[in-house]
Image (cartoon, rainbow, N blue to C red):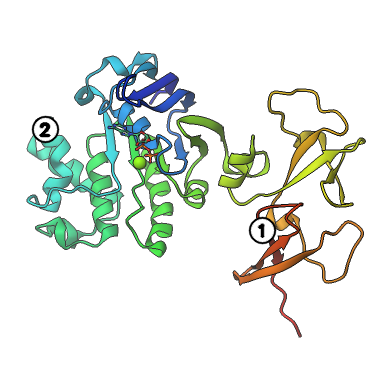
Amino acid sequence: SLNLTYKHVNKIFGEQSKNPVHALKDVSFAIEPGELFCLLGPSGCGKTTLLRSTAGLESITDGQILYGDKDMTLIPPFRRNIGMVFQSFALYPHMNIFENVAYGLRVRKTADDIVRKKVTEVMELVGLTEELKRNPSPTGLSGGQQQRVAIARALVYDPDILLLDEPLANLDAKLRRYMRAEIRRIQKATNITTIFVTHDQEEAMAIGDRLAVLRKGVVEQIGSSNELYTRPNNAFVSNFIGKMNFFNAKLSGQGKATIVGTQTTISVRPENIRFSNKKIVENGASVLLGARPEQLEICREKTPEGIRGTVQIIQHLGQFVRYEVVLDSSISDASMEIDMPYMVEG
Ligand code: ADP
Ligand code: MG
């Protein structure tokens, strides 16, 4: 398998005169052979458009999509060897399960004995049982089983690339978590270069080797889930991957920042400073401080570095307790989220 590379990909829907939608803006990144790559972003940010463009179901306005050094955009969709799975499982109700899975081989005019061998192999891989192989129709299957059939159908003709568009979105929460591990297992077993699309950051962090965060058609950051969580490029990424509490602050020299409207001064490590376009940060410069819920704590007594606030909501979440705290509106206009370890009193 080869690298899948996006070079300055733009996609504009509609005409210049009639409110065009710029769905992908100068998208450039590369996916390694055999990688399980996650594309994460809110609804409408361009995830499906990127997958459909890769599959050739949508033509891009400009840029290149390369598989190895082959320009895929010059190859008609049916010649791109790509498997795709959608959120709506999209099985054929009039075909039995075997024929649903076999479909991609039938259209490729594969010999019967090979079809039987490949379908059996791929159904085993995705964990469909003997009994299900005999089931005449996919309509009686559970959501999880239907999604396994859809994945088997996409894998049966050994695609070079597998595209999964929010494939777990229609499953209930418990099954969704179980299927995350299943998708990782299946992808690692086949080693097919895969893009997994989701709007759910927890799902993306659980599944992807690497993640790209997409916002309004722009790739904001690419990295491992740990990199995105600990070193987010900007406020959007930091608040999309987990929760970030923000304070307006002013730099006050010697690596310190003072939260506006308070006496609270915090050390700022140089490696934790992100620049926008201004490369020089002077004393007195306004900055935005970000703190994860687990980096703050609640104290009952007044402390010199503390800020007064009112606890609004307490959520007991098992390993920790999350407090929602409202500060004076001159300090922050959003409520803070603070996680504290759960303490058993006694
Ligand atoms: P996502 O999958 O991240 O939710 P999409 O790729 O479906 O986002 O859509 C990205 C943007 O492109 C949205 O603003 C959407 O309304 C627009 N869009 C998608 N498909 C079309 C289309 N066929 N015609 C016009 N606009 C479209
Ligand atoms: Mg979509």
Q: In the figure, 237 relative to 82: above or below?
A: below
Q: In which quadrant is the C terminus drawn? A: bottom right
Residue 335, numbered circle: 1
Ligand 1 within 8 Å of the CB at mark 2:
no
Task: Identify which residue, 270 or 140, lies in the foreground.
Answer: 270
Q: In the figure, 39 relative to 131: above or below?
A: above
Seen in the image, is 106 located left or right of residue 220?
A: left
For badge 2, the amino acid type reads Val
Q: Which residue is mark 2?
A: 107
Which element is circle 1 on? loop
For the point 18% across and 59% down, the residue is: 132
Q: In the figure, 342 relative to 276: above or below?
A: below
Quadrant position of ligand 1: top left
In the image, residue 197 lies at what x, y percent?
Answer: 40, 41
Task: Identify which residue, 334 or 346, lies in the foreground.
Answer: 334
The image quarter containing residue 337 is bottom right
For the point 72% across and 55% down, the residue is: 329
Task: Identify which residue, 94 or 252, lies in the foreground.
Answer: 252
For badge 1, the amino acid type reads Ser
> From mark 2 to mark 1, how far is it between C-alphas?
56 Å
For the point 33% across and 48% down, the residue is: 167
